Image (tube, rainbow, N blue to C red):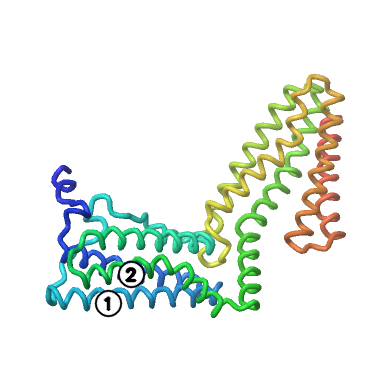
Amino acid sequence: MLSRFSSRRRLDELSEREILALAISNEEDDARIYRGFAERLREAFPASAAVFEGMAAEEDDHRRRLIEAYRARFGEVIPLIRREHVAGAYARAPVWLDPALGIERIQGLAREMEVAAGAFYAAAAKRTTDARTRELLGSLAAAEAGHVERARTLAETHLTEEARRAEAAGAHRQFVLTWVQPGLAGLMDGSVSTLAPIFATAFATRDPWTTFLVGSAASVGAGISMGFTEVASDDGVISGRGAAWKRGLATGVMTTLGGMGHALPYLIPDFRTATAIAIAIVFVELWAIVWIQNRFMQTPFLRAIFQVVLGGALVFAAGVLIGGG
């Protein structure tokens, strides 16, 4: 363990030959990362993919210039040195390997990469004594600083208004598939399926605390069950619905909240008051689900009312009849 750390040197301990070798390696890595981003975005966001292809080409040009400078001073053999070999160098967690990496996160990572690269070249330029090498590193520092503007120029070239609208529609669709749809399914299940056990317990025992305990258990249990079911049912690779854990989280949390909404009023000691508030909350929950279905899922309003309100009313009535009997 100690030998592994002692083998790493700081940037100010590297020779100019090693600094250039490190810069060449960095540019190669950055170009590959940008091309990976482009490949990932190509199907859903082709215009943004073209932007990252252009940025990768910029990194290739930087690498070519660095190799020419290296050959002119040190010959053909370039030593292997990477960021992880240099203590204090700007390191990057391999977040590009995350299969659920979204377009906004990718764009943010690209900006972080350019800032870090510019800082590296500025520091490296101060470490060199050769005028031509110093000039090259300084120009690359300026180039990296200007990449934000370059990215904007590439975006203006490839991201037309029509392309922006198409990508916005694609991002909205992905948001709906990953978060809204699973969350809505959970909210519906939690709000509707827990009506019967909660109100059956309420009218059978007329004990608010017992009703609260049953409602809490039903809500939490349903949330855990629905969350794991969503995760296990689809990994999102083929369906394109996004990361399973995100969908499972949305489903589980919203299922629990849907049930707890009309369980919490039974913390009130008075049975009649608690039940009246719980019924009012159920009314609000069901109409909120109708609105979400109409707003995000484009479900016709009357159909949503029929599916949610009527179904919820039937489950509520079943609970009251069973508990009252």
Quick one: 33 or 307, which is closer to the camera? 33
Place of residue 177 in the rendered image (x, y in percent of width and height, measured from the top left): 63, 61
Q: Say which label, 1 or 2, has the lower sequence index.
A: 1
Position of 138 with respect to 191 (left or right) is: left
Pointer 1 with pointer 2, Cβ within 8 A: yes
Q: Residue at x 38, y 70 (%)?
A: 143
Place of residue 211 in the rendered image (x, y in percent of width and height, measured from the top left): 74, 27
Q: Residue at x 82, y 48 (%)?
A: 287
Q: Residues within 10 Å of mark 2 (few under 14, many from 20)?
A: many
Position of 273 with respect to 71 (left or right) is: right
Q: Which amino acid lies under the numbered mark 1 shown in the image of this protein?
A: Arg
| Secondary element type, mark 2 | helix
Q: Which residue is mark 2?
A: 140
Say above or below: 289 vs 136: above
Q: CA distance from mark 1 to mark 2?
A: 10 Å
Residue at the top extreme of this rendering: 269
Mark yes or no: residue 157 visible: yes
Say above or below: 231 vs 30: above
Quick one: 262 or 41, which is closer to the camera? 41
Q: Which residue is mark 1?
A: 65
Mark yes or no: residue 97 visible: no
Place of residue 270 in the rendered image (x, y in percent of width and height, measured from the top left): 83, 20
Residue 273 quadrant:
top right
Position of 73 with respect to 88 (left or right) is: left
Q: Which amino acid lies under the numbered mark 2 shown in the image of this protein?
A: Leu
